[in-house]
Image: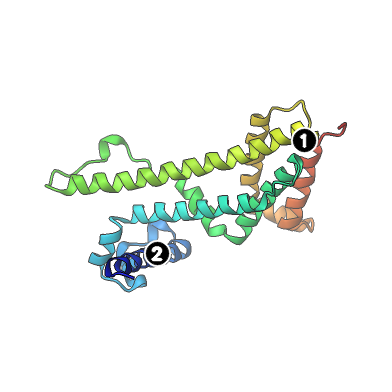
Amino acid sequence: MSILQRREREKKKRRQDIINAAEKLFFSKGYDNVSMNDIAREVELSKATLYLYFQNKETLFFAIVVKGTRLLNSMIRDNIDDNLNGLEKVNAYRNAYYDFTRKYPDYIHIYNYFQSGRFSPPQSDILKSNKAGEEEEEDSSLSYVSECAEEVLRLRNERFFILQKSIEEGIADGTIRPDIDPVETAILLSAISKSLSHIPSDHERLLQKRGISHDQYFQDVSEFILLMIKNLNP
């Protein structure tokens, strides 16, 4: 291995160490309660070194959103076997999404915060500084954030296409009702999957009082969905 290759490997490892440190702090304290100083201390780097890799806390946050979204898509792809029929693929999609929310709830919280509008400053506020060099630095940071946001959107569209295609395959192979619209149904099932990952606490308590666990609730909803979309007259 050449010196250049070794340095590049070390740089990638340090970058990942920084992301992991920021992720740990964001998960435990929340985005707004963490500073770049906190992250530098956690990863045992100077603040100056930290800024060589990430220009601000926001770019780190977006890197973590992308990381979690990639993981979700990977789990969905791995769970959908080409040998399954359309209805089975819809079930596999929903199971993978649910497994992700149970195994990685912190990524769900981070993603919900990402979608909250917290990171959409008005265009007039983007470039505030008149000092030489600072506008270019801000532009670079915003470019990175924009790239991350675009990737998250691309991955979201990829998930939706997988679900829509599964429904279309189910209609074609006779396992899903032929009278439903694939896009409309995909939007509905996507919304249901998201709602299962964030049940209000008062609703959780109501379910618990009736002896219904979160997992049982998921299974019951899955049965409702099956009755709603399954082709009963193949």
Residue holding disc 1: 229
10 lies above or below 195: below
Q: Answer with the quarter of the image where residue 127 lies.
A: top left
Q: Residues within 10 Å of mark 2 (few under 14, many from 20)?
A: some
Residue holding disc 2: 16
Q: Looking at this view, is 191 or 166 the one in front?
A: 166
Q: Answer with the quarter of the image where residue 124 lies.
A: top left
Q: Residue furthest left?
A: 132
Q: Residue at x 33, y 56 (%)?
A: 57
Q: Residue furthest bottom?
A: 44
Q: Position of residue 207 (x, y in %)?
A: 74, 54
Q: Residue at x 13, y 43 (%)?
A: 130
In the image, what residue type sits under mark 2?
Gln
Q: Answer with the quarter of the image where residue 128 lies.
A: top left
- Dot 1: element: helix
Q: Residues within 10 Å of mark 1 (few under 14, many from 20)?
A: many
101 sits left or right of 40 in the view: right
| Among numbered discs 2 and 1, the one appearing first in the sequence | 2
In which quadrant will I find the C terminus?
Answer: top right
- Dot 2: element: helix
In which quadrant will I find the N terminus?
Answer: bottom left
In the image, what residue type sits under mark 1?
Ile
Q: Residue at x 44, y 44 (%)?
A: 151
Q: Is residue 118 visible?
A: no
Question: What's the distance in space between the residues labelled 2 and 1, CA to CA?
Answer: 43 Å
